[in-house]
Image (cartoon, rainbow, N blue to C red):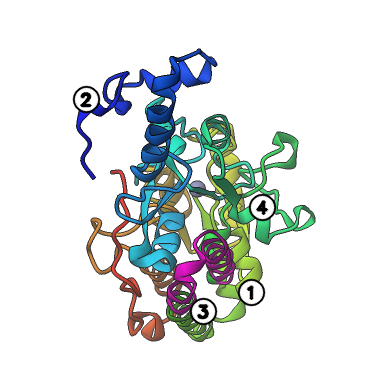
Amino acid sequence: MSLRSQQFPFGHPHRGVLAPALGTRMHFPRRWRGWIAVTVALLALTGCSSVGDSSKGKLVIATTVSPLTNIVANIAGSNADVTGIVPEGTNSHTFEPAPQVAELLARADLVFVNGLKLEDPTLELAKSNLKSGASIVELGTTVLPENQWIYDFSFPKSEGKPNPHLWTSPLFALKYAEVVRDTLVQKDPKHADDYKSNFTKYAAQLNALANALRADTATLAPASRTLLTYHDAYAYFARDFGWKVIGAVQPKNFEDPTPVEVARLIDQVRANKVKVIFGSEVFPSNVLAEIGRATGAKYEESLRDDDLPGAPGATEHSLVGLLRYDYRTMITGLGGTATNLDALDVANTVTDTATYPQ
Ligand SMILES: [Zn+2]
């Protein structure tokens, strides 16, 4: 839609003259009032209002970490512009959004966050910039009652922040996808059939992942289904799939552990006869090598909790790709086999057009 500027007594509507003038209840000559009404209507149609980016007829959706971005992208398909906020490979637990993120949040029809206090600075920025008619959905907080939140090694109750990593369990990823489907159906009912059929395809993939994970877990003796990780991201997976997390190396402030804490971890590794320590590629640390030297435990450093594998557009750049990578690494590292996980199709179930900041 193109408009000639001489139609507007205040200049072009996007230059910001009209909106403040209306907001301060200024008085205008009677002959201008018709143009103001027309201009407001046109602004609504050109994407400056609460109906989303309607120049392309698409919902504008903001998300935070890339696993959430990917779940939303697999349900939204081509009906929405989905943009993540937390760059991949960044520490999402201490992330502070740049002020310019407010521009995206102010345009968004929907903002999906994990909740469980993971992205409080982004959530605050969203609340203070949310446009009329837009909604914020806290996926984790929606699917998990507070009395089931897990507090543990890096997320002690004394700090008030629960372990937020629900999405590393395929069962919670599925619950997130259900909430996303229901939210999109309600917000954009004319595309309800698309959202429902996209969900059906994605749910089948997540269920296949859960089944492969169960089958490959069974190749480990129950006593071997034991994790000591650097980043404490697998608590809900362990509860859902019968694993035991005996500890996490990373302290609650996300710094490296102190020498006293390292000495205690070395004792713990020996006492529990831990064979492998699983590090995180987002949080590289020399401490794992030190514990490995002292105890003889193997360590590997490549688990990932919110940094999808590969570059955007790559087949494995998906939450299912991330989870397959992590669980294959754990199971084979502990002596099992991962033939079912290896056989899984991890490609997105729709074309992923979301934006993943790097
Ligand atoms: Zn994390």
Callout 1 crowding tier (Cα within 10 Å): few <14, some 14–19, many ≥20:
some
Q: Count the marks: how many?
A: 4
| Snapshot quadrant of residue 149 | bottom right
What is the three-letter code of the residue carrying label 3? Ala
The secondary structure that dominates the magenta segment is helix
Image coordinates for residue 99, horizontal then vertical, percent: 41, 25
| Label number found at residue 212 | none
User: What amino acid type should be assigned to the residue bearing mark 1?
Assistant: Gly
Label pair 3/1, CB-CB below 8 angstroms:
no
Q: Per the image, is 125 magenta? A: no
Q: CA distance from mark 3 to mark 1?
A: 12 Å
Instruction: Label 4: state its secondary structure.
Output: helix
Q: Which residue is mark 1?
A: 242
State which region is magenta: 171-198
Determine which residue is flagged by label 2: 6
Q: Which mark is residue 210?
A: 3
Closest to the camera, between mark 2 and mark 3, is: 2
Identity of the amino acid at label 2?
Answer: Gln
Cα–Cα span, label 4 and label 2: 50 Å
Task: Give the Cα separation between the discs numbered 2 and 3.
Answer: 61 Å
Residue 348 higher or lower than 295, as above or below: below
Residue lying farthest right?
A: 147
Residue under label 4, please give it: 141
> Height in image: 225 above or below 35?
below
